[in-house]
Image (cartoon, rainbow, N blue to C red):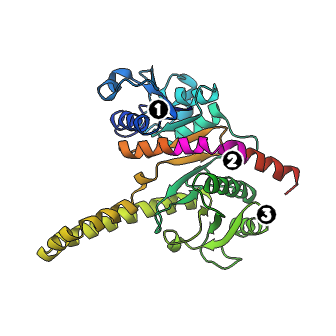
Amino acid sequence: MIRIAVDGMGGDNAPEPIVKGVMKALETFDNISIILFGDETKMAPYLKTHERLSVVHTPDYLDMGEKDPIGKYRKNKKISMFMALQAVKDKEADAVVSAGPTQALVVGGHFIVRRMPEMRRVAIAPIIPSFDGRGRILLDSGANVEIRPEYLLEFAVYATIVAKHVLKRENPSVALINIGTEEGKGRDLDKETYALLKDSKDINFFGNLEPKEVFMTEADILLSDGFTGNIVMKTMEGAAKGLGAVLKREIKSTLAGKIGALFMRKSLHRFKKSLDASEIGGALLMGLNGVVIKAHGSSNDYAFFNGIRQAKEMVEADVIRIVSQTLEKKADDGS
């Protein structure tokens, strides 16, 4: 049985979509049990009795605009997010899913779950929409504004294992996001990282990738520092939202457009679905000593359900153990 700890009070609209996502996951997957941490009074209207669900009451939770997560952790260990993370630390759960503030989850992950000895940094790694509908791993999308090339190589190795064992890509490729495709482009960081990725036997290096190709590329993993990755991710989100708004405006602007939309309803629905991050789940915090999934703060119940599914699949694939063994062997080989 896969045990998943859930922060029931994290997110813009918690606890309703969180609890509903939990109930849907329990109904869908018969090999998971869930420990739900949060204010039982506020969660009660959406809760249903289930043999594989246990609820741990705590009235304390983090506001989405929390500015000092370190201070909050030091003052109060009974906050719902921190209690969920502690469950993994104490081996009471195999994974954590939270839609709470990203910075707090990263801080809590470091302080409670702890970083893997083989990983020198933690990366935020969402799976972003792609043209073929299979999704792409983007990392780092915000945890490390400044980073060293060797850390990016570790991220690439970790993401390769996730792509192979969770996303079922046969020979996943890693692309380095850069301002041009030619070798020698970019900052010193990019040039040095390119050389490391090119020489590595642990990954399948695609080469440099320009941001304009992010949605269409055949590469499975898109690698960058946290500053660049965050801009790429938010640009994609904004472009998808803006494109949808323009399309909706143009359809409504003429009678012919409205009539055409009736005939294209299924196609338009598929178009929207292909750009919707909620279809994929959340972002993995790569590098921690356990599976930690950051669901989007505005997650609806379906999106949060997918975050739980994602956590389940990570545990099933035994990703943490495989990454640890791969990086240990890499270190022993001196590569």
Left or right position of 157 against 16: right
Left or right position of 219 against 121: left
Looking at marks 2 and 3 on the same chain, the residue that comes earlier in the sequence is marked by 2
Left or right position of 334 against 34: right
- Whether 322 is among the magenta residues is yes
Q: Where is residue 158 in the image (x, y as percent from the top left)?
A: 68, 52
Instruction: Residue type at mark 2: give it.
Output: Arg
Q: What stretch is highlighted in magenta?
A: 310-323
Residue at the (52%, 49%) spot, across then down: 283
Give the camera-side residue of 106 and 18. Answer: 18
Tag of residue 121: 2
Give the camera-side residue of 291 and 180. Answer: 291
**Residue 331 visible, this angle:** yes
Quadrant hosting residue 259: bottom left
Q: Position of residue 303 (x, y in %)?
A: 40, 46
Instruction: Residue type at mark 1: give it.
Output: Asp
Q: Which of marks 2 and 1 is in front?
A: 1
Quadrant (top left, top right, bottom left, bottom right) of the N terminus: top right
Q: What element carries label 1?
A: strand
Quadrant hosting residue 51: top left
